[in-house]
Image (tube, grey):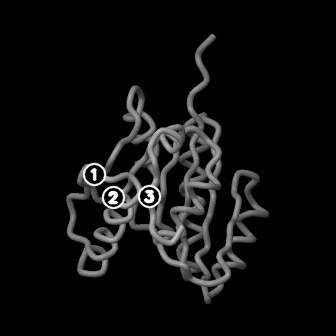
Amino acid sequence: MSEPRDGVTVVVMAYNEAESLVSVVEEIHETLTGMGRRFEIVVVDDGSADATPAVCESLRNRYAEVRVVRHEINRGLGSVYRTGLSEASQDLVTFFPADGQFPASIIRQFAEAIEGHDAVFGMLDTRVGLLGAALNRAERLFYRLLFGRFPRFQGIVMFRRRILSEVPLRSPGG
């Protein structure tokens, strides 16, 4: 009998992403289903003012593996990460933007690459523009505040949930 493989939590970060959210969650769901692991998709709606809340509810009703957490007001990226971390229940955790900038297939690659490790970090080869660069810088700063010194990365990170109990998390604003 083979060992059960680690389950995966994908936290989808959404703010005014009604147009792209369905296709992103469908692609993530299809990828995770094909991996043959336990999984959940946690959509964190950070106070969207468009139709994102209604789209979230339709996805929750469509897929048993989808949970939705809604911030009543936009609280920012740090709060989205804190919410996602507190909601994640599977062994492996990754955060995914709802805008479709990353293919869900990288989740499979990261889940394979993490075997024997605590974390996997992505590095993008493409230019992301000024807004993308600013968001990437903010994300790196957030991880540095949480974990202290942190390897340079850009894009997606996957880590083992158990390290949250082993590494003291620091974040201004709770």
Q: Residues within 10 Å of mark 3 (few under 14, many from 20)?
A: some
The image shows residue 68, relative to residue 132, as above or below, that is above
**Label whose residue precedes the other's in the sequence (2 or 3):** 2
Query: Residue visible at 62% across and 64% down?
Result: 43
Quadrant in the rendering for residue 111: top left
**Label whose residue precedes the other's in the sequence (2 or 1):** 2
Query: Residue visible at 45% across and 63% down?
Result: 171
Label 1's element?
loop
**The C terminus sits in image quarter:** bottom right
Quadrant in the rendering for residue 167: top left
Badge 2 vs badge 1, beta-carbon distance below 8 Å:
yes
Q: Name the residue beneath numbered marker 1.
A: 149
Q: Name the residue beneath numbered marker 2.
A: 144
- Give the amino acid type for the residue marked by disc 1 in the picture: Arg
In this view, the residue farthest toward the bottom is 49
Mark identifier at residue 170? 3
- Measure how far apart labels 3 and 1 are at the Cα level: 12 Å
Image side of residue 54 versus residue 168, left or right? right
Query: Residue visible at 55% across and 82% down?
Result: 16
Image side of residue 135 versus residue 91, left or right? left
Residue 4 pos. (x, y %): 61, 23
Badge 3 vs badge 1, beta-carbon distance below 8 Å:
no
Residue 152 pos. (x, y %): 23, 54
- Give the amino acid type for the residue marked by disc 2 in the picture: Arg
Residue 19 pos. (x, y %): 55, 79
Q: Nearer the viewer, residue 118 or 49?
A: 118
